Amino acid sequence: MNNFEYCNPVRIVFGKGQIARLAELIPKDARILMTYGGGSIKSNGVYDQVIKALEGFDVAEFAGIEPNPQYSTLMKAVEIVKEKKINFLLSVGGGSTLDGTKFIAAAAEYEGNEPWDILEKGAPVKKAIPIGDVITLPATGSEMNCLAVISKKETKEKLAFGAPAVFPKFSIIDPEVTFSLPIRQVANGIADTFVHVVEQYVTHPQNAPLQDRQAEAILLALVDEAPKVFTDPKNYETRANLFWMATQALNGWLNVGVAQCWATHNIGHELTAQTGVDHGRSLALVLPGVWRSQRKEKGEKIAQLGRRVFGIVESDLDKAVDATIDATKNFFSSLGIIATRKEYGVTDEIVQAIANLIDSRGVKFGDLQNIDGAKIIEIMNLCD
Ligand code: NZQ
Ligand code: ZN
């Protein structure tokens, strides 16, 4: 096992009616900027619950953070933060709103001239405005990590940063707020959760049996629980279980001491930047291609996943790998996700442009850092 240090400071406040607890979680004298997205919180009653809980607090609002949050939008919020001397950010919405808020928090305290450097050049985030959140979509795990993914449509870029300074101080997870989610977003969130786990688990063998078993626990629970949300969408227990799985899938617990892959995400982010495909769907498209291309390196772990999670009994390694890829694709199909290049308009030109971009950045993806532009083309040619 590799050396590691682990600290997750996020206070999770989980359950029905917990939005009312906001007043005890935020300092009384805070000057708050409440950030949110395109209005789902107004139609499902979450906005009203937050406003009621914050009666007597000094609250300004910033609306309109879009899915795949845009740099230009977020920089408008940074101006408001500076102008109004905001000292607490409250994100109310999905992963995009929270990621955007993490960036606002970091950019508002950034000392350089161009906050985009945090994403493009890895400029260090030394300080950030404190953040709390009410998370409304089970998917990203952003509520319990210090990561954020930000897009710039002008240059078709979508880049991530991570810094301990942007860990939320608290995250309120009320599963009842997910009853209003469109089924498409429910499916995206389940696919995202699945892929978060396998990015940390389906690597080359690393002899980390506890991390493996923890990953398998989430996957087994997810595969069991996912169908129930489609047949019985008003079931609170199912909603609660799915949310907690999403949170656990990317709170840093599964990847301590092991090398992680993230190639599917890295390529998926580029596809979203180019075509606008939803994050979860981009992953469902790319994952089988990554596994087919990396079957030599990842074969043992792919087969382990198949045997332990999908109950595949095939003893031949190659056949077990194929059966696992099929089972994974069937799982995505069972969520109603059609994951083909044609469906998302992923042309050869787009794939070539992504390959060129990655080579020009001089980066390689994967737990073995062996995926360059040429490999990305191979991977995308192995996708359906
Ligand atoms: O904008 P509003 O009106 O709020 O509507 C949103 C949006 O249209 C809606 N929604 C959210 N909660 C709702 C709801 N509608 C009804 N009821 C609710 N309770 O759902 C739509 C999608 O929301 P979004 O926040 O974009 O989805 P998600 O949470 O899946 O976030 C996706 C973003 O997170 C990034 C992705 O790349 C993408 O930009 N990721 C962040 C990660 C992280 N911070 O660790 C890791 C992930 O791998 C991912 O890359
Ligand atoms: Zn993801």
Image (spheres, rainbow, N blue to C red):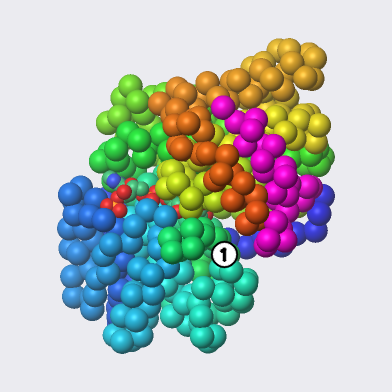
Task: Give the x, y percent position of residue 255.
Answer: 68, 49
Residue 225 visible? The answer is no
The location of residue 183, given as percent across then percent down, is 32, 33
Picture layout, residue 185 above or below residue 70:
above
How packed is label 1: few (under 14 Cα within 10 Å), some, or many (20 or more)? many
Q: How many marks?
A: 1
Residue drawn at point x = 38 percent, y = 70 percent: 72
On the image, the x and y values in percent for residue 241 come to 43, 36
Is residue 375 covered in magenta? yes
- Based on the displayed image, in which of its 4 quarters is residue 199 positioned? top right
Viewed as shown, does residue 122 lie left or right of 176? Answer: right
**Is 263 situated left or right of 204 in this image?**
left
Q: Is residue 175 left or right of residue 105?
A: left
Asked whether 185 or 17 is in front, the reply is: 185
Q: Residue at x 44, y 74 (%)?
A: 105
Of 88 and 334, nearer the camera is 334
Looking at the rendering, the stretch of residues picked out in magenta corresponds to 359-384
In which quadrant will I find the C terminus?
A: top right
Q: Position of residue 257 (x, y in %)?
A: 75, 52
Determine which residue is flagged by label 1.
161
- Residue at 72% x, 42% y: name it: 375
Question: Does 21 appear in magenta?
Answer: no
Query: Which of the 4 image quarters holds residue 21?
Result: bottom left
Q: Residue at 76% x, 30% y: name it.
A: 295
Seen as rendered, the residue at the extreme front is 349
* Amino acid on which disc 1 is placed: Phe
Secondary-structure class at tag 1? strand
